[in-house]
Amino acid sequence: MRKRDLVVRISQELNLVQQTVQEVVQRVFDYISEALARGNKVELRNFGVFEVRIRKARIRRNPKSPSSDIRIPPRAVVKFKPGKEMSEAVIQKPPASA
């Protein structure tokens, strides 16, 4: 599902103008991004928790020249932990056949 699909679905269910729904959805995403950029945790009950974690610096090998090491500096990453209801809903979904 893309953001556009989400906007269309909400506007149809609530009989609202798509432009208005798009602005609301975008603002929600912007506020979540701003909070994470400040280092705050975003907790949405029954959905999940977004938080910023710092990945440690590490050393990796360069595949093109395995004799040289590459230092990867520490960096902030966003982690998501799904809420209980979401986890249970996903677990009950049968795996897709390949």
Image (cartoon, rainbow, N blue to C red):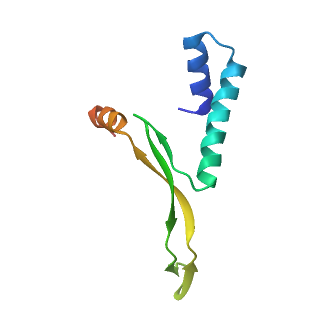
21 and 62: which is toward the camera: 21
Q: How many marks?
A: 0
98 and 72: which is toward the camera: 72
Horizontal relation, residue 75 to residue 22: left or right: left
Which residue lies most toward the bottom here? 67
Residue 49, position as x, y percentages in the image: 45, 45
Q: Residue at x 56, y 81 (%)?
A: 71
* Vertical comparison of 56 with 30: above or below: below
54 and 12: which is toward the camera: 54
* Vertical comparison of 9 with 25: above or below: above
Which residue lies most toward the top here? 15
54 and 5: which is toward the camera: 54
Horizontal relation, residue 21 to residue 78: left or right: right
Horizontal relation, residue 75 to residue 80: left or right: right
Choose top left, top right, bottom left or bottom right for residue 21: top right
Residue 9, position as x, y percentages in the image: 56, 19
Q: Residue at x 72, y 21 (%)?
A: 19
Is any part of residue 96 visible from this angle? no
Residue 66, position as x, y percentages in the image: 51, 85
Q: Residue at x 60, y 43 (%)?
A: 32
Is any part of residue 68 visible from this angle? yes
Choose top left, top right, bottom left or bottom right for residue 27: top right
The C terminus appears in which quarter of the rendering? top left
* Vertical comparison of 17 with 28: above or below: above
Q: Residue at x 54, y 12 (%)?
A: 13
